[in-house]
Amino acid sequence: MPSAKKNSKKSSHKKQAKPSVDLAAMHPEDLIEKAALVALNSRFHAHSPYSKVKVGAAVISTSGKIYPGCNVENSSYGGTICAERTAICSAVAAEGKKFEILAIVVATDASPPWPPCGICRQVIAEFGGPNTPIIDINPKGKKLKFRLKDLLPQAFTSKHLKK
């Protein structure tokens, strides 16, 4: 990592930070595979004492960064937050209003892998678009690919709030 910082300082005099992953140089499938490893590893950080279900997620930002997330349960149940939303919240905290989802990977132990829940789909719609790829995986290598519009065909978006 230190060498990457040196190189970015030498190659650019702009004050804008360089993405951690060069999207132009990386094949989309390579980026998805990197995010898949992040999502699978994030499961081990889950706080799931009630359901015992460990879910990991990795959001790929249009900036080229990958943000991890895991489910965090709460004894009140309503305070529980899913892995997809923890990853998205981390991305928003890091990038602010410019954050947009390029793709999201969700990892569960289930077979077939579980898709995002309804509220997670709605939050993905807030920062992605109808064609945002959602990839569900499990440690056994099973992979399901969807577009947001397939999982949430009538997403409620900011367009509905404009008069």
Image (cartoon, rainbow, N blue to C red):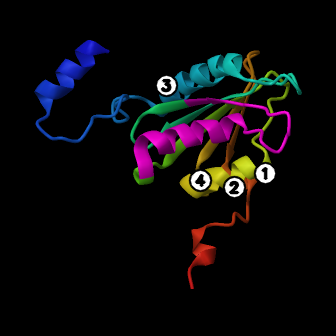
Mark toward the start of the polypeptide (2 vs 3): 3
For the point 63% across and 25% down, the residue is: 39
For the point 88% across and 26% down, the residue is: 50
Residue to which mark 2 is pinned: 122
Q: CA distance from mark 2 to mark 1?
A: 6 Å
Q: Secondary structure at mark 3?
A: helix
Toward which corner of the image does residue 144 lie, by quadrant?
Answer: top right
Q: Which stretch did the figure color magenta?
A: 68-96
Q: Position of residue 35 (x, y in %)?
A: 55, 27
Foreground disc of the pair 4, 2: 2
What kind of residue is marked 4?
Answer: Asn
* Rendered image: mark on residue 30: 3
Contact between marks 3 and 4 (CB within 8 A): the answer is: no
Q: Tell me if residue 76 is in the magenta stretch.
A: yes
* Rendered image: mark on residue 155: none
Query: Is residue 87 found left or right of 8 in the rendered image?
Result: right
Contact between marks 2 and 1 (CB within 8 A): the answer is: yes
Mark toward the start of the polypeptide (3 vs 4): 3
